[in-house]
Amino acid sequence: MRKFELAIARMPILGRVLLTLFRAKVAAGSFRKPLAGLCKWLFTSRETTNFTYDLEENNKRYLASLIADIVSIKFSVAMTYIEEIEGDEALQRHIADATMKSDLSFMADPKVRFGRRVGWYAFVRALKPTVVVETGIDKGLGACVLTAALKRNKEEGCEGRYYGTDINPKAGYLLSGDYADFGSILYGDSIESLEKLEAPIDLFVNDSDHSAEYEAAEYQTIENKLSRNAIVLGDNSHCTDKLLEFSLKTKRHFVFFQEVPRDHWFPGCGMGISFKR
Ligand SMILES: C[S@@+](CC[C@H](N)C(=O)[O-])C[C@H]1O[C@@H](n2cnc3c(N)ncnc32)[C@H](O)[C@@H]1O
């Protein structure tokens, strides 16, 4: 035993108090960074929900490695896709302009930070899907990322179409300009919109009503609409096991990616990935 622990062991009451204070100091160390991030965020961001941030560098590399393994491409290619979206200046300008023109600009940041959506982008670039569906679009950040990938795919000779769903008629103001040429928004309840969708889905992103029941109902609705090698991404897998359950039931593989935001108090979301080999 170290000297400090020996001294505490000899003082039953005072020792316990000192030990408790010492343990509190050790645990408080874990809150220092998020607390500093919170103070900075309060004065530098306008966001109230659906927070945006960059991912830690290694977190991005782990994501690239995971995607490379799932879609059988080299790690370096997956990293190139991530760097491509992060360096897309036209998209950055588009989002900043559309945000400033919007009625909701008082609670949105014009600076673009994609978080896990860089993974959504890499999947579209690697898979070259014909149909991409995202349920729940909010401002349209994911919609812009996904259509930016379809835009690049078209330049390489592979055309695809994006469909977003949202119950809020004001959602999706970022999906405008060139990006709107690659997709459209189906307004109304997501499950009703999915039931009407006829084309086979190659990439599906679940991000609408985040209750476990609704999430499961979305997977059930699209089960027979997925193409042979479709990938399903669950933006709720850090909260529920519904995508894992769906994958087990339909004999698909499931893996989970945990975001690690850089310089932000938010602990990050997770991305469930369901796929066939
Ligand atoms: C977390 S946000 C989506 C974020 C977006 N995917 C992104 O990348 O920024 C959730 C969205 O789901 C929508 N929503 C909630 N319930 C819904 C439902 N039953 N049908 C369709 N959209 C719904 C909300 O209006 C909200 O815009």
Image (cartoon, grey):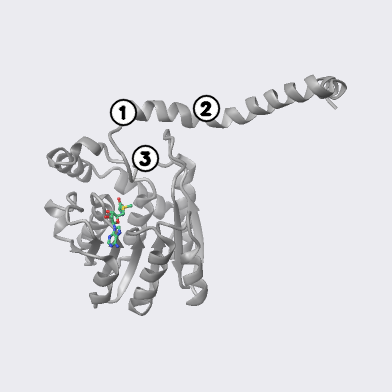
Single out the mark in the foreground, 3 or 2: 2
Which residue is denoted by mark 3 in the rendering?
53
Image quarter (top left, top right, bottom left or bottom right) of the N terminus: top right
**Residue contact between numbered discs 3 and 2, judged by CB atoms under 8 Å:** no
As drawn, the residue found furthest toward the right would be 10
Which residue is denoted by mark 1 in the rendering?
44
Type of the residue with mark 2: Arg
User: Is residue 200 among the parts visible in the rendering?
Assistant: yes
Question: Dot 1 surroundings within 10 Å: few (below 14), some, or many (20 or more)?
Answer: few
Give the image quadrant in which the ligand numbered 1 is located. bottom left
Instruction: Label 2: state its secondary structure.
Output: helix
Front residue of 235 and 97: 235
Q: Residue shown at 23%/76% (left/top)?
A: 196
Quadrant in the rendering for residue 233: bottom left
Type of the residue with mark 1: Thr
- Horizontal arrangement in the rendering, residue 276 relative to residue 184 (left or right): right
User: Is residue 72 among the parts visible in the rendering?
Assistant: no
Q: How many marks?
A: 3
Question: Dot 3 surroundings within 10 Å: few (below 14), some, or many (20 or more)?
Answer: some
Q: Is mark 1 within 8 Å of ligand 1?
A: no
Which residue is denoted by mark 2 in the rendering?
32
